[in-house]
Amino acid sequence: MVIWSKGSKSQALAVYKAFTVDSPVQQALWCDFIISQDKSEKAYSSNEVEKCICILQSSCINMHSIEGKDYIASLPFQVANVWPTKYGLLFERSASSHEVPPGSPREPLPTMFSMLHPLDEITPLVCKSGSLFGSSRVQYVVDHAMKIVFLNTDPSIVMTYDAVQNVHSVWTLRRVKSEEENVVLKFSEQGGTPQNVATSSSLTAHLRSLSKGDSPVTSPFQNYSSIHSQSRSTSSPSLHSRSPSISNMAALSRAHSPALGVHSFSGVQRFNISSHNQSPKRHSISHSPNSNSNGSFLAPETEPIVPELCIDHLWTETITNIREKNSQASKVFITSDLCGQKFLCFLVESQLQLRCVKFQESNDKTQLIFGSVTNIPAKDAAPVEKIDTMLVLEGSGNLVLYTGVVRVGKVFIPGLPAPSLTMSNTMPRPSTPLDGVSTPKPLSKLLGSLDEVVLLSPVPELRDSSKLHDSLYNEDCTFQQLGTYIHSIRDPVHNRVTLELSNGSMVRITIPEIATSELVQTCLQAIKFILPKEIAVQMLVKWYNVHSAPGGPSYHSEWNLFVTCLMNMMGYNTDRLAWTRNFDFEGSLSPVIAPKKARPSETGSDDDWEYLLNSDYHQNVESHLLNRSLCLSPSEASQMKDEDFSQNLSLDSSTLLFTHIPAIFFVLHLVYEELKLNTLMGEGICSLVELLVQLARDLKLGPYVDHYYRDYPTLVRTTGQVCTIDPGQTGFMHHPSFFTSEPPSIYQWVSSCLKGEGMPPYPYLPGICERSRLVVLSIALYILGDESLVSDESSQYLTRITIAPQKLQVEQEENRFSFRHSTSVSSLAERLVVWMTNVGFTLRDLETLPFGIALPIRDAIYHCREQPASDWPEAVCLLIGRQDLSKQACEGNLPKGKSVLSSDVPSGTETEEEDDGMNDMNHEVMSLIWSEDLRVQDVRRLLQSAHPVRVNVVQYPELSDHEFIEEKENRLLQLCQRTMALPVGRGMFTLFSYHPVPTEPLPIPKLNLTGRAPPRNTTVDLNSGNIDVPPNMTSWASFHNGVAAGLKIAPASQIDSAWIVYNKPKHAELANEYAGFLMALGLNGHLTKLATLNIHDYLTKGHEMTSIGLLLGVSAAKLGTMDMSITRLLSIHIPALLPPTSTELDVPHNVQVAAVVGIGLVYQGTAHRHTAEVLLAEIGRPPGPEMEYCTDRESYSLAAGLALGMVCLGHGSNLIGMSDLNVPEQLYQYMVGGHRRFQTGMHREKHKSPSYQIKEGDTINVDVTCPGATLALAMIYLKTNNRSIADWLRAPDTMYLLDFVKPEFLLLRTLARCLILWDDILPNSKWVDSNVPQIIRENSISLSEIELPCSEDLNLETLSQAHVYIIAGACLSLGFRFAGSENLSAFNCLHKFAKDFMTYLSAPNASVTGPHNLETCLSVVLLSLAMVMAGSGNLKVLQLCRFLHMKTGGEMNYGFHLAHHMALGLLFLGGGRYSLSTSNSSIAALLCALYPHFPAHSTDNRYHLQALRHLYVLAAEPRLLVPVDVDTNTPCYALLEVTYKGTQWYEQTKEELMAPTLLPELHLLKQIKVKGPRYWELLIDLSKGTQHLKSILSKDGVLYVKLRAGQLSYKEDPMGWQSLLAQTVANRNSEARAFKPETISAFTSDPALLSFAEYFCKPTVNMGQKQEILDLFSSVLYECVTQETPEMLPAYIAMDQAIRRLGRREMSETSELWQIKLVLEFFSSRSHQERLQNHPKRGLFMNSEFLPVVKCTIDNTLDQWLQVGGDMCVHAYLSGQPLEESQLSMLACFLVYHSVPAPQHLPPIGLEGSTSFAELLFKFKQLKMPVRALLRLAPLLLGNPQPMVM
């Protein structure tokens, strides 16, 4: 049994799943299988992966995927071990003892096999290794001595151990290349005889025969003594030949022991295999003659198994002289050190050592390069991945932490006795170090907490089993028993690891992280990045030791500890530096900044440090080489307190990091600039500034100090303690090449960019300063418009800082920012937004950028939000704030399940009223589509067949009661003709509207054929026996009822075979309904899930209806697939497809018809020759002798014709390979008659004797064959515009010829002719009349005239019938041509003809034409009308249908009712969600469904099988687009603009539709756009393909839209007069005042804005001063909301606050002023001005009045300051004199705002020598100082005491 459980820190292990198998489990593991057809190496990155649990048993392996699929694969051999790889599973075959009888070298079998997917074959592994002479060989892995000890997926490597040589080797595992496949599979050069083919596949055959499932329990290989592994004697002892190699012959041929395969399954006598060694290197296998006889035996199995994986040799240990016999590694892992160098470590337990090999990727990424081996003494080890270290258990029982091969320190666990107690070391107190060399680690408090300590029940365990048996929690955790020591280390996860103690208990410990505060982590990363690897590792080890000392630091003092540690390593004496000395290591929350002359505090803040200095650790450290940095002695520490702090301190140049100070300073400066871009890191910046200022002063970097001063005027004093660096030592300092004397400033860079000045590239640290990189690139892209920078990596805006050896980092960078061109991107804003999401930038990142820097990005987002593309990925839509799009993108990826709109009507509500099968419609959407009236209820009333009908008969006085009852029942019988016809229409109306519950059967409404007679409401029943009722009257009606119920099920529902069978009714009388239900399931595609067994079950019952429903359903589900199994199923029911000698099956006629149509569906459009030939013959199948094929022949012939048409659908004259069949000519003959051709084909025997019933002679019976042939021609030549064929179908134009053709057939011919000449159909009555031949047009009676014109030679009856039928045929073709288009002219034309036919019916001389003919034509025209208006619910058509619904009796038989209600159903197809398509396939389906000859009564299938009426489903397609408001998640109205592509009939046009609406057919459209102003615009471009839109439509057509602020939906405000913007237009001038905060809720639903309005904009009682602020806030809020930029609100407020603070002179840091400056610069930048010119309407991002006011206020404040003494201050600054403390912050603001250059840059003569302003201008030109600022400086510089305030 295998148990999968999930544990967590908070609670106990929970069992997630348990798998039980029959035989003992040998191994259980996880493996990811790749599901893909493409097996190339590239495909691996992209493919989806199936995660599986694999359970190995002795004879098979079970695989259970997470999704719930189960596989089982039997194993053809005993498996010793299974390994999961990147590609699939790898098996090691276990070597059995029988296999190596000594002394006969034979062809060995491979020992390693792979299986790439549970359904793939198990294939041998190939290896490629270099031989002595350097040429590499490819061969199977056959060496038994080779055992896999470790397998890793990334990098994909295998480590093996050779038991003979006692060495470990590393191989890379990859896919086999095709040339290697060929080498292995090639036949040997020596004996290239045919037998080799046989023998080489013997292994294959054997494996295959076994994997068929009859796997023997023991390995089959053990039974044959003739199989031998290559004997050791033949191989030379050299290392290379010991690599798993076998002879060339074996490598080249596949001749594994031939005996093997043959004996395993044949009784043939054994092969004699004589094998002689020609050379130690070559074995050849020759066969004795008797092998020829059975060489052929294997022929069927000769396809060899192609190997799939290959291992390449990478590295082998060097062989030492004394190598113990069993030194196989017991544990192997990959670890990386703190600098990212990777090591492969393997533990050799027998020698108690851990061997570590360093490896790295070669520069071209293709291979791994291995370095030297380092041995570490160890008893056990485990990697700690989170912190890049590993934990090693030494033989003495000490736990030591290593990073790579550098020792970090010993680990001390409170509560575990330390093994070193016995040593002489005394322990001063529990938390002091145990060992002199390094500090121990405190381990996350005492490990007594529940989740951390697990005690095992004492069950003896295997070393490697990872299952904890019923683990008990040990509360009190006492490890004080003597002699407990750590036995082994196991289960490392993240930074936690389990220690197994010798007494069987287990402890879970956590190794502390390198650093917990983000600031320290970032700084460490940066320093690590810049230092050489060795020094970096030493630095980190040192820091780790300080940081994790027992009783380690709290979060806030971590920074102080870091600074102290770092500065010590640089050579500072931190105890003498005032600001570091006062660090309080206990609980201070922020660094204490000492005032200048502070005395050393007496509070004991130094105690910790002193304690550290006095510790033994410190004494040891001083002597240690690496750690000279702590060059203080305890004695110094004690004297220190008395010394004076004002003296200068000097740096110790011998320390570890001394030479790297400039580099470290520079990267820390970059980190500082990076942190400035994160508004959340303010506190960290202040701490970092102090460190930077100290370093900058000591390195004498004036510009940097000045830069920091300008940023933080209050923190940075102009003077401070300086530690002198010995001038002699400065030479040793390593000034890196990237060091710049000017401080790089990100704000300055952006500012210059906005002003359009050139800038040097900005330096950045890959992986650390990602934000800086992002900001620089996005500004360059958006402001400078440089599009190239996104795609190519080497940008001229950034310099990447590297120290030469670190190539790797660069490579990794490049992969991350590759720009995907797939997304449509036009403008720069779009480029920017798409690029940013690809880089992984999110809204949360944007919120933490300072507002000035974020402004250009927000501007780009604002522009994109207006007009996004519909195919942007979800992340982009989220970034630009279009939830409607992101939700759409996210829905698009969901599986088709229950949709958003599916109405969940609780089933309980419908119980009172009888279920009429129409309860599940989505009323919410329908009430939007047809909002003005109740037409939907009306349709429901017309189509319901579950309630009794009203039988209204007046009892005349002369009628006796008995006669009256008969009268009532006869009337009911008439009405029932109508009731029985309703279900077909109901199926159309409720099409695909319901998702069934899998636990309940589908409700099928009753078909109610009773009546109620008023006034007493007495029940009238047909079964009273008073009148004759036709037998089986209701059988087809209930079939249709079942279909209607089944068609409610949406194709997206989750249905399985069991549910279908579960619906099978108990009562036999419901069998017909179930038959219909099966057909419906086929039509909506669910029948493919029904198991073949069940299909067989249903067909053998012999129930005619079930067979019809099932055959048609299965065929429809497999439309056009040529599926073989279905073809077999259908052929049994078609005698013509069976061989002539087969038994005659008694198949009912209707089932044959269904099967023939089924063949047509399955082979639709394939032009399959044999099928077409048989069907062509079947159209004219003559009646047989014994009454066979004599009844209802017409429907069979028609079915054959329709099927033939489908098979060759639209192929026209290019029917490949059928020219000899003469299809069109034969069809023409069937159509017009003539002499029957001699029957060809295999069935001619049957037709020798003519029928005894029907005398046909040898001419074709046109009455039978014509309809099928006509429609077959129409479908074969559909839309081909083939004139010659069309002329055959012209109506005859002489009276003589007209007499030969049934008027009904003229309808079909006209229809066929128009379908062929598809492009000629025009939607007007003139075109319709043009189809009528002249003779008819001239002589046809107009039905309104009273008298008939007398004429002898003209048969008026024929002419008028021909006339109406031809008109009807033309109308029907018009319906096909414009099906589902709602074309207005087509509608008007057809509506006119429908009205005409209605009037003809009541005309006095209708009898000439015959009322039946007129009714037929009217029904046809009505159906055409409904096709054109399909799904639209058009009112005029509904009125026609309703009128015809009321007509009963007379000529109105079942068929006409059927037609009228089908028209009604089409009109409301799928509740208005579906429409008809005009693709070839749809037209074929509609021809079957709407065949214009309607049944005379409910059991009439003579001319057309009734079941075919439902094939209209194949022509229905979802085309309703429903806008859903993304905030309320309800359907709503939205305006769409639909653009049609240009065609030969019209130019490209646009049309506006109010959605929800049916779209036109998608192939006609160019694009669809949701139009403003109420909703955000949204464009769906169809020129790129319709897939996106199709998937939206198939998921109920939900299109998410988002209401713009201040707009109401069309439902609430149809005319648009109530929206907020409309109200405010009236009083434009005082808009801010007119804006009441209460009304904001109409604008936005954002809770943040609502509360802002609530708390900041509502006036309170005693306002006074604050009124002005309130007004400002209100107007700002109004601005943000109306311009749809609520995200700008914080920026407005921050600017306002900053200005107020500046006015109060309280600016302690200038970053906000910088931001305001950037905002102003952005709006005056060139690129922004250009954008405004292009889109003047696009609202300015910020209110145009706000910015000038901001600017003006700042100018005024600063100018006032100049007047009250600021000018002196500026002068002092520029001339480098000392300044007053109080003015520092204002001065910094002035310098920043006016971008005054630093004093060092001013020209030396500049201050005094200039005389005129012009001269100043010239001098300052190259300093890029703005004129505004210069005007303010001019008075100072020109020596003029009066400042010029402007």
Image (cartoon, grey):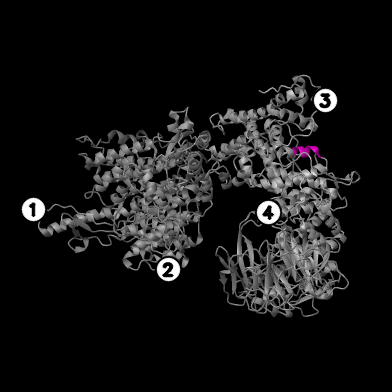
Q: Earlier in the sequence, mark 3 or mark 2?
A: 2
Mark nearer the N terminus (1 vs 2): 1
Q: Is residue 1638 magenta?
A: no
Q: Nearer the viewer, residue 1686 or 1326?
A: 1686
Q: Label 1 is placed on what type of residue? A: Pro
Please state which amino acid type lies under the numbered disc 3. Ile
Can you tell which of label 4 and label 1 is closer to the viewer?
A: 4
Residue ID at (22%, 39%): 1403
Assign the magenta stretch its main secondary structure.
helix
Q: Which residue is mark 3?
A: 1805
Give the farthest residue toward the right.
Answer: 728
Q: Mark 4 and 2 residues: CB-CB less than 8 Å, in contact? A: no
Please tell me whether mark 1 sits on a helix, a strand or a loop: loop
Report the span colored magenta.
Answer: 701-707
- Residue 153, percent across and down? 70, 61
Is residue 532 left or right of 1486 when viewed as pictured? right
Residue 42: image tag = 4
Q: Are marks 3 and 4 in contact (CB under 8 Å)?
A: no
**Image depth: mark 3 or mark 4 in front:** 3
Q: Assign a secondary structure to mark 4.
A: loop
CA–CA distance between discs 1 and 2? Answer: 59 Å
Residue 1388 in the image, given as x and y percentages of width and height: 34, 36
Q: Quadrant of residue 476?
A: bottom right
Please tell me in which quadrant of the rendered image residue 308 appears: bottom right
Q: CA distance from mark 4 to mark 2?
A: 47 Å
Q: Which residue matches tag 2?
A: 1097
**Vertical relation: 241 (above or below) 1014:** below
The Cα atoms of the two marked residues, 4 and 1, are separated by 93 Å
Estimate the spatial distance between the alpha carbons at disc 1 and disc 3, rounded to whole Å.
Answer: 133 Å
Q: Which mark is residue 957?
A: 1
